[in-house]
Amino acid sequence: MDGNGRWAKSRHRPRLFGHRAGVRAIRPVLDAFHERGVHMLTLYAFSTENWRRPDDEVRGLMTLLGETIDRETDELHANGIQIRAVGDRSRLGERLQAKIRMAEEKTKANTAGMLNVAINYGSRHEIIEAFQDATVHGVSSEEMTEEILSSYLYTRGIPDPDLIIRTGGEYRLSNFLLWQAAYAELFVTPTLWPDFSPTDIDEALAFFAGRERRFGSTSEQVDASRKEKRA
Ligand code: FPP
């Protein structure tokens, strides 16, 4: 959800003003994706590197996260959406951790859609922790497989993303879902997150629909397997 700071700056307002606008952008985006048949989304709300930001911005973001969970959980639950936080929550305040647990517990049986929120998330840290955790559970380095490692990531049970959308125009992943995004299509838009609208979503989905997903195979093999499926 990149670009909140620039959005605020262009209005001569503090960065938190941009983050608040960023939160307001979330609901219409979720609804628009839902209407278009996309029922699983992961939002990158706070990275392990974001602790380096000024104290008041970090505090403000943590407060916003808590307030947003309080305000939105019931309606997401009523719409059958499962909420999950991905990231190292041990460094978050006790109250925020409790809110996250409450939202996850309340919505855990929902099946209409899934909203994952990456909070204190960093992919490299996630992969190292997953490896260590697997070792603690008795998995030897010889036994390690992609499936086993995946089952120790914060995203266990969540399918890998098909499409990563980066707002704000930067062409990089910034430590986001590095393992899981191995075959994701990447869509970068200069639109700043608070301005991200259904038009941008349509553009992203049109881009995705135009991609040939080969997963390492050749175009000919992809065509042949499509024909086989049709037959
Ligand atoms: C990146 O923009 C945005 C963030 C680091 C924070 C995003 C978090 C929220 C909007 C709160 C979300 C709450 C929930 C519950 C999902 P930036 O500040 O890096 O923008 P810039 O690149 O323009 O400076």
Image (cartoon, rainbow, N blue to C red):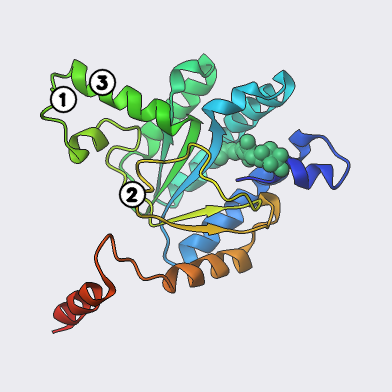
The residue closer to the viewer here, 154 or 126, is 126
Quarter of the view holding residue 70: top right
**Residue in the image at 64% along x and 53% along y:** 169
Q: Earlier in the sequence, mark 3 or mark 1?
A: 3
Give the class, few, some or many, for how many residues have Cα within 10 Å of label 3's Cα (few <14, many ≥20).
some
The residue type indicated by label 1 comes to Ser
Give the class, few, some or many, for how many residues have Cα within 10 Å of label 1's Cα (few <14, many ≥20).
few
**Residue in the image at 42% along x and 66% along y:** 37
Q: Could you tell me if the residues under marks 1 and 2 are in contact, i.e. CB atoms within 8 Å? A: no
Find disc 3 in the rendering and name its residue. 133
Q: Could you tell me if the residues under marks 3 and 1 are in contact, i.e. CB atoms within 8 Å? A: no
Q: Earlier in the sequence, mark 2 or mark 3?
A: 3
**Residue in the image at 64% along x and 32% along y:** 64
Q: Position of residue 159 (x, y in %)?
A: 31, 49
The residue type indicated by label 3 comes to Asp
Q: Position of residue 201 (x, y in %)?
A: 56, 64
Going by the image, does 26 lie left or right of 89? right
Question: Assess mark 2: CB under 8 A from ligand 1?
Answer: no
Between the C-alphas of marks 1 and 2, the distance is 23 Å
Residue 160: assigned label: 2
Find disc 1 in the rendering and name its residue. 141
Q: Earlier in the sequence, mark 1 or mark 2?
A: 1
